[in-house]
Amino acid sequence: MSEYIDIIFLLVLVIVIFSRLKNVLGSGSEDTKVIMISKDQFEKVYKELKREINPNANESVDLDKLPPIDRDLAKIPNFNKSVFINGAQKAFEIILAAFSKGDEATLSKLVNKELLKKFKSVIKDRKEQGITTETDLIGFVETEVESVKFIDEDKVNLVVKFVSEQVNLLKNADGEIIEGDENYVQKISDVWTFEKSLNPQVNNWLLCSTKKC
């Protein structure tokens, strides 16, 4: 499989190099010259362009030198920690807003079936009581993967701690604030667990549990 990937990269690199030379020398230049470079220079250019084309590609690392949690993360196909953290923060923001608004359609795309049932139950209870919520996510103080758990050799769970600043309000049917302060920013710690298949073709993570800490 890696041989095919390298062939694809080489084809893309040829296009990139040709395109750049064409931009520099001009498409119709009669003074175009063949540029000769050493093997070391070629390998350096190849690595730089390969990294530019696919900045998330995992380079070979000595797993024994990594912390235990990073060794586990390295076992997840196509996993990139910084990309995952960015995606987890975005998911946190979207799920928080969707749950606050009672947007079940959005939640169904981002959480698993068991958690969706719990969310729907809470949303239903709020509607019956005439209670509405407003959540304003100010920003993240900290986001970190706390643990990795492989399940039945075909699934992985990541436990992620989010420390964020939020403004949360509960309002009654008349729109009066019954809990919270719109001028008070809370620092809240949440621990969310995301799950994903270990199939390399599956890239989407689903939220499967939440708790406060």
Image: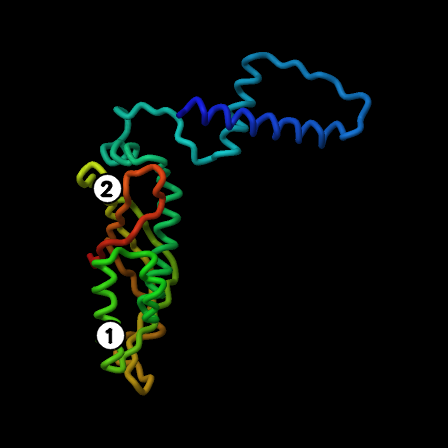
Q: Nearer the viewer, residue 209 or 202?
A: 202
Front-lying residue, 48 or 201: 201
Q: Which quadrant of the figure contains the N terminus?
A: top left
Vertical side of 176 occupied by 79: above or below: above
* x and y, in percent, of residue 213 in the image: 20, 57
Q: Which of the pair 56/116 is nearer the observer?
A: 116
- Please indicate whether residue 184 sits to the left or right of residue 147 in the image: right
Q: Position of residue 157 (x, y in %)?
A: 23, 45
Q: Which residue is mark 1?
A: 124
As measured in the structure, the alpha-carbon distance from the residue carrying label 1 to the one carrying label 2 is 31 Å
Q: Residues within 10 Å of mark 1 (few under 14, many from 20)?
A: few
* Point 27% across, 49% down: residue: 194
9 vs 73, left or right, is right
Q: On the image, numbered disc 2 is attached to which residue?
A: 155
Residue occupying image coordinates x 34% and y 68%: 103
Where disc 2 sits, the SS reads strand
Helix, strand or loop under label 1? helix
| Number of callouts | 2
Q: What residue type is disc 1 on?
A: Lys
* Image point (71%, 29%), residue name: 22
Q: Quadrant of residue 67?
A: top left
Residue type for callout 2 = Lys
Return the disc, 1 or 2, that comes first in the chain's sequence.
Answer: 1
Residue 44 picture location, percent across and down: 53, 20
Extreme residue in the bottom direction: 174
105 vs 144: above or below:
below
